[in-house]
Image (cartoon, rainbow, N blue to C red):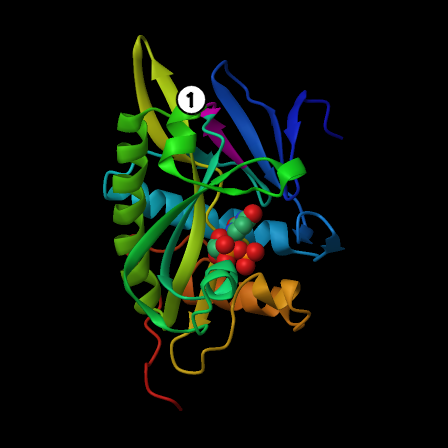
């Protein structure tokens, strides 16, 4: 069916050539991978949910002035994006200890951190995405010092906004991973948010029960992966097929146990 030129295939997404120069089509697959590809499964419907959730979040971030690669959603699995040069770093923002931070530093999972932390990982599957310091980033010219500053400022703004957005729907944003790209317009370059923001790359815990509503359900064989992603989509108000009325937003969820 797809006669378009495939530009890149990743673990959970495919990029196709877009309709105009400087655009790409980002296609969300149902593949789930973890532990650097050692674990793999198909979770039917995950791609559709991530497309919707990521669209919603990128649009909201655009509304508060965060530059992103997102142009518009095309269909159930695809969105039109602006082509950018991806900076080869995964930027992780953490609010609560979990995952590799909890393991590496021996901090109890679930402990609120004294302040939000930003970490950088070098995007390289063969090396297992090692954590790197700013020293490495500048020495190997993955990004310049001003680019690092810009990514950190944007990451904190994105975090502040998303913490509030999720708390409003009864979810704690524990941590997340984002990626940035360079976008050129004439001779001007700007750093924009790229890739996706979805339960594949966030830790999302129910604010009342601490139930995991993210990819940890897959990593830790907990089951109910699709149901958890559906719950996030439902609370964000993006599950309905009908166009949502103007001004409708996230669905407020009671913070009291029922
Ligand atoms: N993350 C991601 N892709 C990666 C590594 C991490 O999306 O390749 C996300 C992960 O979902 C979590 C956050 O980044 O929300 C921090 O992950 P962590 O360093 O704790 O690693 P993990 O425990 O997932 O190996």
Tell me which segment is drawn in magenta: 79-85
Nearest to the observer: residue 202 or residue 45 = 202
Q: Which residue is mark 1?
A: 141
| 23 w.r.t. 178: above or below | above
Q: Above or below — where is 40 with respect to 255?
A: above
Q: Quadrant of residue 163?
A: bottom left
Residue 15: where, in percent of width, then height?
A: 60, 30
Q: Is residue 213 left or right of residue 172?
A: right
Q: Position of residue 212 (x, y in %)?
A: 52, 71
- Magenta-colored segment: predominant secondary structure: strand
Q: Nearer the viewer, residue 19 or 220?
A: 220
Mark 1 vs ligand 1: CB below 8 Å: no
Residue at figure coordinates x 33%, y 28% from the top left: 191
User: Left or right of 206: which side holds 43?
Assistant: right
Image quadrant where residue 75 sits: top right
Neighbor class of circle 1 (other Cα within 10 Å; few <14, some 14-19, many 20+) is few
Residue farthest along the top direction in this orientation = 187
Image x and y of residue 1, in percent = 76, 30
């Amino acid at each position: 069916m797809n006669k378009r030129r495939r530009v890149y295939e990743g673990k959970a997404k495919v990029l196709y050539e877009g309709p105009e120069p400087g655009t790409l089509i980002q296609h969300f697959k149902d593949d789930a991978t973890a532990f650097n590809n050692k674990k793999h499964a198909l979770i039917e419907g995950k791609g559709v949910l991530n497309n919707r959730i990521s669209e919603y979040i990128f649009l909201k971030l655009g509304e508060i002035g965060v530059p992103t690669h997102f142009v518009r959603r095309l269909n159930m699995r695809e969105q039109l994006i602006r082509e950018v040069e991806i900076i080869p770093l995964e930027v992780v923002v953490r609010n609560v200890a979990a995952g590799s931070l909890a393991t590496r530093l021996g901090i109890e999972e679930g402990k609120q951190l004294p302040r939000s932390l930003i970490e950088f990982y070098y995007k390289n599957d063969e090396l297992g995405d090692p954590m790197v310091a700013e020293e490495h980033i500048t020495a190997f010219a993955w990004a310049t010092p001003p680019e690092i500053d810009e990514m950190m400022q944007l990451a904190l703004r994105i975090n502040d906004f998303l913490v509030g957005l999720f708390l409003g729907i009864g979810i704690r944003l524990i941590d997340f991973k984002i990626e940035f790209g360079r976008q050129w317009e004439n001779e001007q370059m700007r750093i924009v948010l790229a890739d996706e923001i979805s339960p594949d790359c966030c830790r999302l815990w129910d604010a009342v029960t601490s139930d995991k509503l993210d990819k940890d359900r897959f990593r830790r064989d907990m089951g109910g992966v699709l149901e958890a992603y559906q719950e996030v989509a439902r609370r964000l108000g993006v599950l309905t097929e009908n166009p949502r009325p103007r001004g409708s937003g996230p669905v407020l969820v009671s913070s009291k146990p029922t």
